Image (cartoon, rainbow, N blue to C red):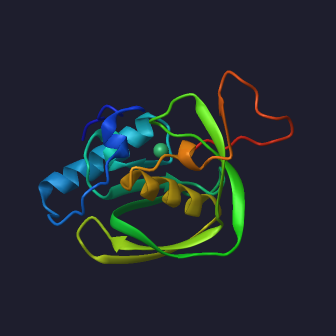
Amino acid sequence: MAVRPIVTYPHPVLRKKAQPVTDFGPELQQLIDDMFETMRAAAGVGLAAPQVNVPLRVIVVEYAQDEHARPERYAVVNPRIVYVSPETEMGTEGCLSIPGVFGDVLRPRSVVVRGQDRFGKPLNLRLHGWLARIFQHEIDHLNGILFIDKAVRVWRESQQPAPQEAVERV
Ligand code: NI
């Protein structure tokens, strides 16, 4: 395993539509292992393959609902959102590819994601709250979409967000 460099905005790969994965061989296994290691080294909770300059439809997510919960780990290949809840929720996001920038993004509170696991087996995931938000953020990356495109308000870390608002970092 290896930590790969994370590309940052405005690198053109972040604006490309990533390609579907058809080969589940050793190169994909290495990519997924490296993505987990890279995400952890950067203290992130999600990472999409274009962020390590690989234009393929692969995401990894590792998120604990609270400090006592065991983190849930996902590697999803060719993920797609097949359902979004009518209920939406505002949340503050950041991105490992846009360091030091945060924004408030309105997203569906729950989603269903279909795709494949790292070996090609079908997956069907019902996700809620922050986990749903992380998946939506990462799947947007596969379509060349960044959270700053969707944010109703964006600010630099050096500026203070409005008081009494909790800042969550993705
Ligand atoms: Ni991101």
Residue at 61% across, 71% down? 110
Q: Quadrant of residue 97?
A: top left
For the C terminus, the quadrant is top right
In front of the other: 154 or 2: 154
Q: Quadrant of residue 24?
A: bottom left
Is 94 left, or right, of 74 in this rendering? right
Residue 84 screen position, x and y as percent: 57, 74
Number of numbered discs overlaid on the protein picture: 0
Whether residue 63 is visible here, answered yes or no, is yes
For the N terminus, the quadrant is top left
When the figure is inspected, residue 65 is found, relative to residue 83, above or below; the finding is above
Residue 141 screen position, x and y as percent: 41, 51
In front of the other: 108 or 39: 108
Residue at 24% across, 58% down? 19
Whether residue 37 is visible here, answered yes or no, is no
Is 142 left, or right, of 71 in this rendering? left
Residue at 22% across, 63% down? 21
Residue 95 screen position, x and y as percent: 51, 40
In front of the other: 34 or 49: 49
Looking at this view, name the residue that lies furthest to the top. Answer: 158
Q: Quadrant of residue 158?
A: top right
Residue at 37% across, 67% down? 79
Residue 78 screen position, x and y as percent: 31, 66
